[in-house]
Amino acid sequence: MWRTPNQHRSPQNASEVQPGTIHADTQGQSYPVFALAHLLGIDLMPRIRNWKDCLFFRPSRSVTYEHIDALFGEPGRNVIDWKLIATHFKDLMRVTVSVREGAISSTLLLKRLRSGSHKNATYTAFREVGRVIRTVQLLRFLSDAPLRRRVTAATNKVEAFNGFSDWVRFGQRGTVTRNDPVEQEKDVKFTSLLANLLIFHNTLDIADVVRQLQAEGEVIDPLDLAQISPYLTKRVNRFGVYSTHEIGITPEDYDTRLDVDFSVLDDDQVPAA
């Protein structure tokens, strides 16, 4: 999920919305992922669990900290290898530019940089950069309570969408059974398309109800409206007969305006969609 715009436009993303901050769950915080995101100009902010298992890395063996030194383990250990990063800096940038220009997919790259590639020089360099970035992010999390709340709120929205998508894709218990990568990609994309269409439909219905209440003189509190999720399933019938004769009918223009001031909300209070 993205939160803020990014000036670096990917050739594979032609939309006006470009990710500047990306949220993920705990599994989205490996060292190579942190490194690649940083080199692409993206602020990776995953929700982090099991803090006791996270390593903090020192910039040098001689550095100590008065109040938080215990986080970095024994003195002289968990030290960043800056020489390694400098040696392979051109390789890191070459790979990053290839990803940004679409010459290689980030998914394929991260598969090559999996944790079993310890003898791969490019992997070790990405890992070392990732150690730097994740240590900085961990320190930010520790010192900034509002940041932790924003990350948790954003990750909850992502997980809510994933749960909604799983509900939409009820066939075969939501599993992709085909080994063909092309068919797997179709499966995922069609599921996302259907989920987004239902979310759009629910959002329009919510907006119509809000406008009706306002016409009746009700005052809509943006805080109350922010608690309403568009991932509604009660009125969606996944089973039964669906008419297709209306596919060719052009629907009426929908009203995108909603007379509610969301500017009074904090970032983590803005509606999920």
Image (cartoon, helix red, strand yellow):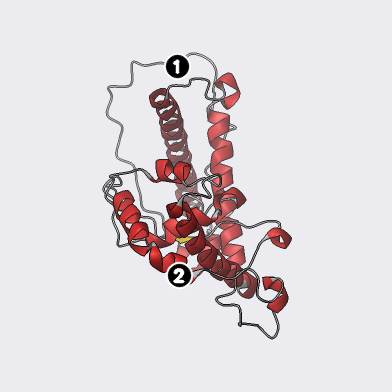
Give me the disc on residue 151.
none
Can residue 2 be seen? no
Q: Position of residue 79 (x, y in %)?
A: 59, 71
Q: Which residue is mark 2?
A: 83
Give the residue drawn at x 33%, y 62%: 90
Mark 2 to mark 1: distance in Å?
Answer: 63 Å
Amino acid type for the residue under numbered disc 1: Tyr
**Can you tell which quarter of the image residue 192 is in?**
top left
Q: Position of residue 226 (x, y in %)?
A: 55, 56
Q: Position of residue 85 (x, y in %)?
A: 44, 66
Mark 1 is surrounded, within 10 Å at the Cα level, by few (under 14), some (14 to 19) or many (20 or more) other residues, namely few
Give the residue drawn at x 70%, y 61%: 51
Give the residue drawn at x 69%, y 86%: 66
| Secondary-structure class at tag 2 | helix
| Secondary-structure class at tag 1 | loop
Q: Which residue is mark 1?
A: 242
Camera-side mark, 2 or 1 = 2
Contact check, label 2 and label 1, Cβ < 8 Å: no
Amino acid type for the residue under numbered disc 2: Lys
The one nearer the camera, 153 or 121, is 121
The one nearer the camera, 119 or 68, is 119
Can residue 39 be seen? yes
